């Protein structure tokens, strides 16, 4: 029973953090209700499969796969090309299918040639600290907007939604710091359920229907045969290098969490690279969203104390199973978004502690201050630049400059390596 509860807690965490991306992308491409339901189903199915593949054959750590923010950004940028560079939304989606397949192939090449392991050596404690801080700062804006009830630009703050979010955070903090170990261990699922009940009592929980069908297998190449044009190939090459940055950072952070508990970890970056390649291929073949290991898993594990990989494996299997039952997906899709944001905020409080733990590992304080100063200014500054400022730039350039996390991390790597070589 305890094992099953732990697995369902992983399910709740994984779905709550993943359901928004396919809904938002389906809206960007103006998909019908039926097509949106299929897109959500395929994405959740691929994420469950990707998590299992990594846990069994890749890094072998309890790190869930989520929709890659980089791919999300590329989908958003390419949606604007419909009617200009491409004739329709469907043609754009076939191009993006091809892009994810190309990305999978590049992952295989990086892993087979040993380049992935060389890239992992660049992730010193300084870089991991900066990456985590930028991740927290980048997502904090989305968390606060979500808890304010702001879903789009120009929308006003909703006081009732804010009140419900505050109450949910207080409940989550109470459970996560409870004296009883079993309550702390299941604090996330207890907080999600409590927050859901709070929003129902306040009349703020609206049901969402994904599909009325009881069983549905995910289709492949839904939008047509994948298209491989020059533009998307160049974009995919660059995106893949950036995805490796996310992947390595997520693994490094989780390894530190596991080491703190005395659990053995293995630097399986090459194996993880091959698994990521397979996962990108799955995203393209199933017409879904490319995945990436989620750094927030480390905060989740630290908050709940669930260090064993067994509940994670069971939870990933359950994710794949429920994706085949649209009626069950309706239930998860009905979770009020502010509840997910509020509970995730508490998880990310732990991430701040993890970041500061990496900071304390560095002996050369002067160097880390200099590298962090430049990188945080560049990364955080980029977060305040509106996306519209990059609309006339090539997709490859826009996808970097429009992502403060990646821009800041790359800046940190270059600055630190320059200082090390000069010294």
Image (cartoon, rainbow, N blue to C red):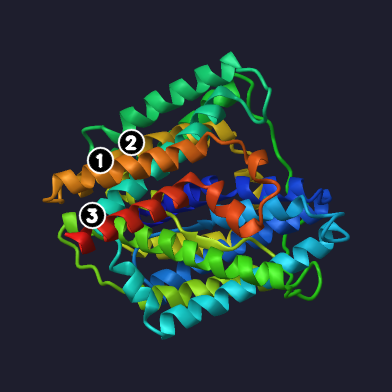
Residue in the foreground of this view, choosing between 407 and 161: 407
Which is nearer the N-term, disc 3 or disc 1?
Answer: 3
Please determine whether, in this image, residue 7 is positioned above or below residue 277.
above
Residue in the foreground of this view, choosing between 125 and 31: 125
**Quarter of the figure with the N terminus:** bottom left
Residue in the foreground of this view, choosing between 347 and 364: 364
Which is nearer the N-term, disc 2 or disc 3?
Answer: 3
Q: Which mark is residue 353?
A: 1
Rendered image quadrant of residue 396: bottom right
Instruction: Give the structural element (helix, strand or loop) at label 2.
Output: helix
Instruction: Give the structural element (helix, strand or loop) at label 1.
Output: helix
Can residue 94 be seen in this snapshot?
yes
Which residue, given by chain and number where applicable, does mark 2 sit on?
Answer: 349
| Residue 252, x across and y down, in percent | 30, 60
Tell me: 340 left or right of 19.
left
Eye-nearest disc, 2 or 3: 3
| Residue 212, x across and y down, in percent | 78, 51
Alpha carbons under labels 2 and 1: distance apart: 7 Å
Q: Which mark is residue 125?
A: 3
For the residues bearing labels 2 and 1, Cβ distance under 8 angstroms: yes
Residue at x-position 32% and y-position 28%:
174
Please determine whether, in this image, residue 364 is positioned above or below residue 119.
above
| Residue 165, x across and y down, in percent | 49, 24
Residue at x-position 67% and y-position 28%:
153
């Amino acid at each position: 029973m305890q094992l099953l509860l732990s697995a369902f807690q992983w399910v709740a965490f994984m779905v709550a953090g993943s359901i928004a991306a396919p809904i938002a992308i389906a809206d960007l491409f103006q998909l019908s209700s039926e097509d949106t339901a299929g897109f959500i189903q395929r994405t959740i199915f691929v994420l469950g499969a990707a998590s299992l593949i990594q846990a069994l054959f890749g890094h072998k750590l309890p790190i869930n796969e989520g929709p890659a923010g980089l791919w999300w950004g590329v989908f958003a940028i390419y949606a604007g090309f419909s009617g200009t560079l491409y004739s329709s939304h469907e043609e754009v989606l076939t191009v993006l299918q091809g892009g994810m397949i190309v990305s999978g192939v590049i992952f295989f090449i990086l892993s087979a040639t040993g380049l992935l392991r060389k890239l992992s050596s660049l992730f010193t404690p300084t870089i991991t600290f900066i990456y985590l801080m930028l991740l927290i700062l980048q997502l904090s804006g989305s968390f606060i907007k979500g808890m304010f009830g702001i879903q789009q630009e120009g929308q006003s703050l909703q006081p009732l939604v804010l009140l419900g979010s505050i109450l949910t955070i207080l409940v989550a903090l109470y459970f996560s710091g409870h004296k009883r170990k079993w309550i702390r261990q299941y604090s996330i699922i207890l907080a999600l359920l409590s927050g859901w009940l709070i929003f129902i009592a306040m009349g703020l929980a609206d049901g969402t229907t994904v599909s009325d069908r009881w069983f549905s297998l995910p289709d492949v190449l839904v939008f047509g045969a994948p298209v491989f044009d020059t533009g998307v190939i160049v974009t995919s090459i660059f995106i893949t290098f950036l995805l490796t940055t996310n992947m390595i950072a997520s693994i490094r952070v989780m390894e530190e969490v596991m080491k703190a508990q005395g659990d053995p970890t293995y630097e399986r970056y090459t194996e993880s690279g091959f698994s990521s390649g397979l996962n990108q291929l799955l995203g393209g073949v199933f017409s879904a969203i490319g995945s990436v290991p989620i750094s927030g898993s480390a905060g989740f594990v630290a908050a709940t104390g669930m260090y064993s990989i067994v509940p994670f494996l069971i939870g990933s299997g359950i994710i794949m199973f429920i994706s085949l039952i649209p009626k069950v997906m309706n239930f998860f899709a009905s979770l009020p978004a502010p509840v997910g944001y509020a509970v995730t905020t508490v998880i990310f409080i732990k991430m701040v502690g993890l970041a500061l733990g990496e900071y304390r590992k560095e002996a050369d304080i002067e160097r880390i201050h200099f590298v962090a100063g430049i990188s945080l200014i560049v990364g955080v500054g980029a977060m305040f630049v509106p996306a519209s400022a990059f609309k006339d730039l090539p997709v490859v350039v826009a996808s970097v400059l429009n992502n403060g996390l990646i821009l800041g991390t790359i800046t940190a790597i270059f600055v630190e390596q320059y200082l090390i070589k000069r010294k």
